[in-house]
Image (tube, helix red, strand yellow):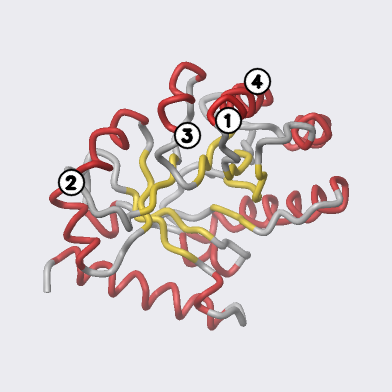
Amino acid sequence: MSDIAANLERIRERMKTACERAGRRAGEVELVAVSKTKPAEVIQQAVDAGQLLFGENRVQEVMQKKPLLPACVRWHLIGPLQSNKVRKILPLVEMVEAVDSLDIARDINRIAAELGLHPKVLLEINVATESSKHGFSADAVREQLDALYSLDRLYIQGLMCIPPFDPTPEHSRKYFQQLRTLRDELETQGGAPLPMLSMGMSHDFEVAIEEGATLVRVGTAIFGGR
């Protein structure tokens, strides 16, 4: 068994245990293997170990890697998307996880209409209102929700966040709770389900699962450092 296969096995077991602690079924949470900066041959080792969903931060990396890997591999864009890259990425990914403003949502909607697509997206929330992070503030997403729902090509599936890094996983819990609470509020406000919460990374994904994550984005714990 390769190191990557062994790492994936450990991650899946930890996910299962976290679900059990939270009274959830293991199938409620999906692992997004964050493969940014990793070459296709390394990603193939994860595919061989049964991992099919990968997250990339950069459009160019998806464009380079996708043709080199099996057609069954699924891709999420998990980094910020610039308007001039929207046309390139929409046909290649299953989901854009980091829609961080109304402007980029409008660009995605317009280009999706031109391409005949209905992309799935998550709204990125800046849970700690960090100036260095992308995303809607909680107030902004409340104020702009009607405008976001008026974009008829988008399937808004839920929310994602990247809390401030803290080596103590428990310190992330309050941010995951904030995201879940905001999601529940937006479901009531908008009258539509938002079933997906993308939150939790290599160091804190178990806490995220306990707080309701449906997608966890794990890179270093699978592939090692960059």
Looking at the image, do the residues carrying marks 4 and 1 touch, with CB atoms under 8 Å apart? no
Q: How crowded is mark 4: few (under 14 residues within 10 Å), some or many (20 or more)?
A: few
Q: Name the residue under label 1.
A: 112
- The residue positioned 35% from the left and 51% from the top of the image is 54
Dot 4 amino acid type = Asp
Q: In which quarter of the image is the N terminus?
A: bottom left
Q: Distance between the residues labelled 1 and 2?
A: 28 Å
Residue 90's tag is 3
Q: Where is residue 68 in the image (x, y as percent from the top left)?
A: 19, 44
Q: Which residue is more in the foreground, 173 or 123?
A: 123
First-in-chain label (1 vs 3): 3
* Secondary structure beneath label 1: helix
Looking at the image, do the residues carrying marks 2 and 4 touch, with CB atoms under 8 Å apart? no
Q: In which quarter of the image is the C terminus?
A: top left
Residue 103's tag is 4
Q: Distance between the residues labelled 4 and 3?
A: 16 Å
Q: Position of residue 3 (x, y in %)?
A: 14, 66
Q: Mark 2 points at which residue?
A: 40
Residue 202's place in the image compared with 166, above or below, is: below
Dot 2 amino acid type = Ala
Instruction: State which mark lies toward you, 4 or 3.
Output: 3
Outermost residue, top side: 84
Dot 3 amino acid type = Leu
First-in-chain label (4 vs 1): 4
Q: Distance between the residues labelled 2 and 4?
A: 33 Å
Q: Residues within 10 Å of mark 1 (few under 14, many from 20)?
A: many
Q: Distance between the residues labelled 2 and 3?
A: 20 Å
